[in-house]
Amino acid sequence: MKRVLACVATAALALTACGGKTDPLAGPSSTAAPVAADTITIGSANFTESTLLAEIYAAALEGKGVKVSKKLNIGSRETYFKGLQDGSIDLIPEYTGNLLLHLNKEAKETVDNEVYGALEKALPDNLIVLDKSDAEDKDAVVVSKETAEKLGVKSIADLAAKGPVVFGGPPEFQKRADGLPGLKANYNLEVSEYKSLDVGGPLTVDALKSGAVQAADLFTTDVAITANGFVVLEDPNSNFSAQNVVPLINKAKASDNVKKVLNAISAKLTTEILLELNGKLAAPDKPDPAKVAKDWLASAGI
Amino acid sequence: MWEWLTNPDNWTKTFGTPGIPQRLAEHLQYTAVAVVIAALIAVPLGAYIGHTGRGGTFVVGMVNAFRALPELGLLILLALSMGVLLAFEAMTITLVLIAVPPMLAGTYAGIRNVDQSAVDAARGMGMREREVLVKVELPNALPLILGALRTATLQVIATASIAAFVSLGGLGRFVVDGLALREFDQMAGGAVLIAALAIVVELVLAGAQWLVVSPGLRAPRSRKRKATT
Amino acid sequence: MTWVLDHVDQLLSLSAYHLWLALLPLVLGLLIALPLGWVASRYYWARVILVPAAGLLYTIPSLALFVLMPLILGTLILDPLNVQIALTVYTVALLVRVVADALAAVPATVAAAATAMGYRPVGRFFAVDLPLALPVLLAGVRVATVSNISLVSVGSLIGVHGLGQALTEGFQRDNYAEIIAGIVLIVVLALAVDAVLVLVGRVLTPWARIGGRR
């Protein structure tokens, strides 16, 4: 039955050939082959603000003639950092405090300049950080308005004094230096149960709203905090250090042109702008981060 | 990975994070609840469709369509819309939707494949339709029904690992946390535990099937006589 | 709904990439499973080893296998090969048993007749055994295809984005339209490929359509 064999073989070849041709259609984010040496691959973490910042970097760099390839929505820092080390990505927007703690769990600096200085020293040889921005997005322990009023708490110390709580946040918060271990060390906060939710996303917001958790880890630039009347507990012992937005880049790809563009962005970004852009992204019609990024760049004159 | 599996700390409750035995119990709980509910839906429905012969193509089409459903997507959708407080219910709905199609198909096929002469004899003896179904067709269809139950249970055990994405427990917790923390020993340990659980449950169910199915129906272990080349 | 209409091109290119991620492992897996299954159908000892081993592989949770691939293979973290090779493993695990059963179900009398007509073993395999085993084989391939298409969505959790991106991104941004679009497209894609496979099966087995019971 040579005819049968021929049919099967053709079908198989057609399928694979089909697949091969459609690969480029998927856009720059699909290439697995090594990218050209002059292209910068920009990555982002698994939360929307990171993608927004990555899109801002990408649009600005492309506008200045740099070739850019994007690999967005990779995962937690523990995941994408490996990508920086093995060359899968070259550039990613980062936050000074958390990056420092990732590199050195024992780091004690909390003030922005000190954190930045320590960070420069702690980075491996092939990676550097460029200028830091004034814009900050910190983790925070957040409770609902009802919980704040019922327990009469204004700071994390107050909360710790009330006894063990049910806490919600991303899975990595359980082990991060400024996560549960840090809260325990700085405030003696006991956790009766930890619910692994998402990275400051709708699941965590819902858990706080419905009372499934009493306190949660959210980000300070999240519009859901004001939208739902949540209360950000004060952090007098500085468990959460300064978190300035900063580009983390492979030294080999940091040409003068690239540095100029990224530093210009960092100079213009502020925490208020982050809040405003996050608000735009959270609107019901869910605009693309790429579009929001381009609009802001145009209005900021970059 | 072996260090993680043999570390006694992981087998007891530590710092608000439950250890392996609790996660195992949770995983079994999710599985059992879903399989029982799915059986209560699929077996009567499949028996009815198989017995009356109506809706056979519907069964085949539905089974195919449901096999294509991405479980993770469905779970996310349900968890977001129902809220975290109902995460367990969202998980159960997802698992039931995964377990029903194979059990429905298995029951339907089992009833359809019952020896028609036995059914005719039963009718000839004066049994009413419902008695024919319950006393003749179902016991004869038992091997296929139980086989489908085993398949469905294994699929549910494998899929229940995604419960960890929406704050629930189960053995998937180690896989998800291990992924977020890049702790491969925890992740691999979780994967091994899930696979081991699947094997153990499969053996237990196979044993139960051997006990329950009438000896007359046991398929002989035939060695195919190969034609000499 | 407007979100979906605004993002049709993006969804279409994600679908195409999704198919590429799912179907290459299918073809590779089939090519690997054929010889393995053939060995398992002829020799009892091979069957006893291969079929349970395949069953074991299939119970490994997909996410764990995807993540462990870079460690086992030494690939880059974000390489789509991680997803494709893991899916090939699952396909082989699923199809080895199917191939073994399908080949074992070829009636001994037909095989004997073919040999008597002068077919050598290899020729007999391609000319007689394989075509007769095709219906059962095709059923297995259909299951493997649908399963692969569904599993590719899990790859988004490690940054390899097919249609699963609509699921993870929709999750992060609380965008129901995106999540539903992702789920619907994955199901539609799977059913479409399944229908194509059914057609291919009908073309390849003309004798099954002539007379006889369904």
Image (cartoon, coloured by chain):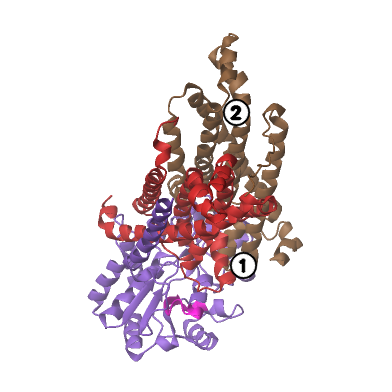
Chain colours: A purple, B brown, C red
Label 1 neighbour load within 10 Å: few <14, some 14-19, many 20+: many
| Of the two numbered discs 1 and 2 in the rendering, the one whose residue sits closer to the viewer | 2
Label 2 neighbour load within 10 Å: few <14, some 14-19, many 20+: many
Which one is in front, A104 or C131?
C131
Say if the magenta span includes residue A98: yes
Task: Give above or below for B201 relative to A286.
Answer: above
The three-letter code of the residue at mark 2 reads Ala
Give x and y (percent) for residue B63.
Answer: 46, 39
Say if the magenta span includes residue B98: no
Q: Secondary structure at mark 2?
A: helix
Chain of the residue where label 2 is placed in the rendered structure: B
Using residue A116 as the reference point, say whether residue C183 is left or right of it: left
Using residue B130 as the reference point, say whether residue B222 is left or right of it: right
In the displayed orientation, state which residue is furthest to the bottom: A256
Give x and y (percent) for residue A117.
Answer: 50, 87
Which one is in front, B73 or B61?
B61
**Residue drawn 60% across the image and 9% down it:** B125
- Circle number at residue B184: 1
Give x and y (percent) for residue C108.
Answer: 59, 41
- Circle number at residue A89: none
Q: Secondary structure at mark 1?
A: helix
Chain of the residue where label 1 is placed in the rendered structure: B
Using residue A35 as the reference point, say whether residue B218 is left or right of it: right
Give x and y (percent) for residue A289.
Answer: 32, 66
Residue range in magenta is A84-99
The three-letter code of the residue at mark 1 reads Phe
Whether residue A146 is visible, yes or no, is no
